[in-house]
Image (cartoon, coloured by chain):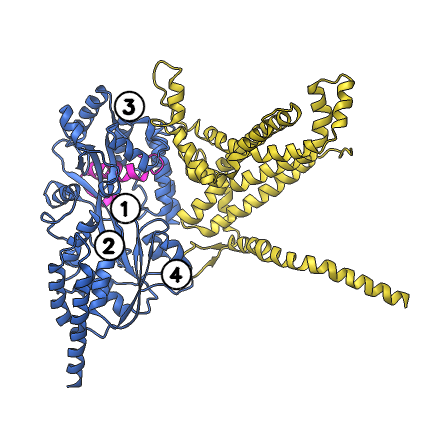
Amino acid sequence: MISKLKTSHIWSRRLFIISFLLPTLALFALFTVYPLIQGLYLSFFDWSGGSETMNFIGLDNYRELLADDIIPIALKNDYFLVFWKVILIMLFAVFFAVALTRLKLKEYGFYRIVFFFPNIISVVVIGVMWSFIYNPTLGFLNKFLSLFTSSPVDTNWLGSPKLAIWSLLPPSVWAGIGFYMLLIIASILAIPSTLYEAASIDGASQWRQFTTITMPLVWEQFKTSVIHIVITTLNGSFIIVKLMTEGGPDNQTQVLGYYLYQMGFKQFHLSYGATIGVLILIVSLITTLILHRVLSRETIEM
Amino acid sequence: MKKTMTGVLVLLMAMLSLAACGGNDKPNPTAAPAAPTKTNEVKATEAPSAEPKISGDFEIQYFVGGYGDGWWKEVIGEFSAMYPELNIKESAGSQINEQMKPRWIQGNPPDVVYIDGAGSNETQMVLDDQLMDITEWIKGAKNVDGEPLVDGLIAPPQDYDGKHYTIPLVFGSWGTFYDQKLFTDKGWQVPTDWDSFLAVSEQIKAAGTHPYIHTGKYPYYIVGGLLNSGFVAANGYDPQILKDQEAAKENSFNNDAVRSTLNKLVDMRDKGFFDNASFGMNHTDSQMLFLQHNDAMIPNGLWLENEMSKDVPEGFKFGFIPSVMQEAGGKYVAIPYTSNIAIAKKAKNPEAAKAFIEFIFTKQAAVRWAELTGALMNVKADLESSGASDVVKTAMNYFNGGDTIVAPVFKLSADMEQAENDATIALLQGTITPDEFIDRMEKAAAKERK
């Protein structure tokens, strides 16, 4: 009798859990696993993206990928953006978060909105807006810089082989700060103020409080933010490149995401584009795993 | 007896709906209602009796971009009036190429497709085996006015290994546009050859204006408007070099014609004739700088005037020269571009598709195209009296004159075009030499041949 009750209890418990898991699993399979496998499947074919037939070519797309001169440039640019975006966004986000919470500014609410503002603007608008700012003849940046020089500045920010990739950084960083700042603010606000009070009484400076209290306690949030920046950059720098340079001049701002698009839809090698997609997936996975290792520290309990 | 009765009935119905159509046309301010209606009546009496019955569903896919859809609505209206039993479906819009793509892949395409705009490429459609082989049909095809269709074309149907799949509908030319007002005001001579081009560029530069701007984001503008005509001129005015490049033949880039043309480009670069703003700039921005008298010359296509019509400042005048890289005393070289129309290989109503093509390739349709779009349709027609733009008329005079060689229509494969775009920008930025340019292109061609 007792065992019967127990089994029915176990069953209803299982049913309860399954009722949550199954729909999620189904949706995950439909919208994530299936396209993933489809993309992988496509990468073994030669398909333009427009014909009714596909030719199976085995690993030829992958061989071509290895021999492609543009792939290393794109990879290098991807990691260039990852590296600088992580450093700059996290530096600014943490700085502003600490400044807004710990320095007890009166205009806290105002600044929080101002910094978050770029996040609610569409990336398309950001890209177009910054293209105008960078315009060598009519743009704001050169006009502004010309105020301080004797002859007018005519630097071509997006068109010069050396400057172009650097010029993509300010819009991406500017657009990213607000979101990560909010994440860090939330986790700073969760730290009990008694910790800071005790530290002040013991004579710890603001910097000391930051390094020994704030950073260790927001580390989990910090780590999540870094990994999120890395993943979104590897998968999403396509948009900013498409809007501002289309990979030019001469592939100097080429990134894997845009190269996928260019190959798949502009040069009519959709299956090769899928192969680049597989490469992006592998690269993102490896990078995330490495970062997990590098950034993992013992979780500090409050 | 019965047959003639039906014939008369069809004819009557056609006339009736034509009358209705004429009424519909009137609100169009630029339309000349008298002329088209008249010719259509003549057509209506001949066509139905001569051809197999045209009926059923008929679908046309056309991209709507800079040329608008006024012309399409008009000809489709007239066509529908001529064949009232035909149920015409228009699949049109600025995103139509993307929207229709799944249907092409699934083997359920429209009957007729006008290939233009982003996401379309006729060479790719031929490679993908989606277009009907019209080689035999086009030879004998006559338009509704009874004239042989091919004879009336400016640019003949493009050749794909001896076969035809497409017919150019829009014809235009690349070339150098210059700021005519600025040239007149400052007393600069319009260049007629390479030496005078260099001389006037020097003058323009000395006057504090940038001689030449182009869109560095889309390098095919400078390739089409400057380089390709240079290749032909340096090749003893033999445009075969472009067809060889299209066919990805060995040494179609590694030759003296290409090398000397690239050296001319390097010469321009080193003399500082290019506006530094060109790099990374999109076509609209570069055209705006040209319109604001910031730059004196720009490589572009004949659509420029129409495209920028809303932004042309008061008193601005466009000047057009087909090419500038020829020797003194040489000929002009016009590099054409076309947008094509084709019948789908899996068209469900090929008879109606053929009838439609025969219907639109007429002189009066060409005049209407010029009037409604400001551009040229690919049919020889007298435009002097029409409402076509001055630039288009000037260009037409160049094409008809004896001093101009009109190169055949050609298009590099998407891969080679991308390679040429990249190499051109790299050469203009001085990151590669002409020999490296040639090397890159020969490699791209070799890859294409595989």
Mark 4 nearby-residue class (10 Å; few <14, some 14–19, many ≥20)? many
Q: Secondary structure at mark 1?
A: helix
Same subunit, tags 4 and 1: yes
Same subunit, tags 4 and 2: yes
Q: Secondary structure at mark 2?
A: helix
Q: Which residue is mark 1?
A: B244
Chain under label 3? B
Per the model, the C-alpha gap separating discs 4 and 2 is: 26 Å
Chain under label 1? B
The tag earlier along the polypeptide, 2 or 1, is 2
Badge nearest the viewer, 3 or 4: 4
Badge nearest the viewer, 4 or 1: 4
Q: Is residue A123 left or right of residue B45?
A: right
The tag earlier along the polypeptide, 1 or 3, is 1
Chain under label 4? B
Amino acid at dot 1: Asp
Amino acid at dot 3: Gly
Q: Is residue A31 left or right of residue B311?
A: right
Q: Residue at x 55, y 34 (%)?
A: A116
Chain in blue, by letter, is B
Q: Which mark is residue B104?
A: 4
Q: Which mark is residue B449?
A: none
Q: Residue at x 27, y 40 (%)?
A: B224
Chain under label 2? B
**Quadrant in the picture for residue B293:** top left
Per the model, the C-alpha gap separating discs 4 and 1 is: 30 Å
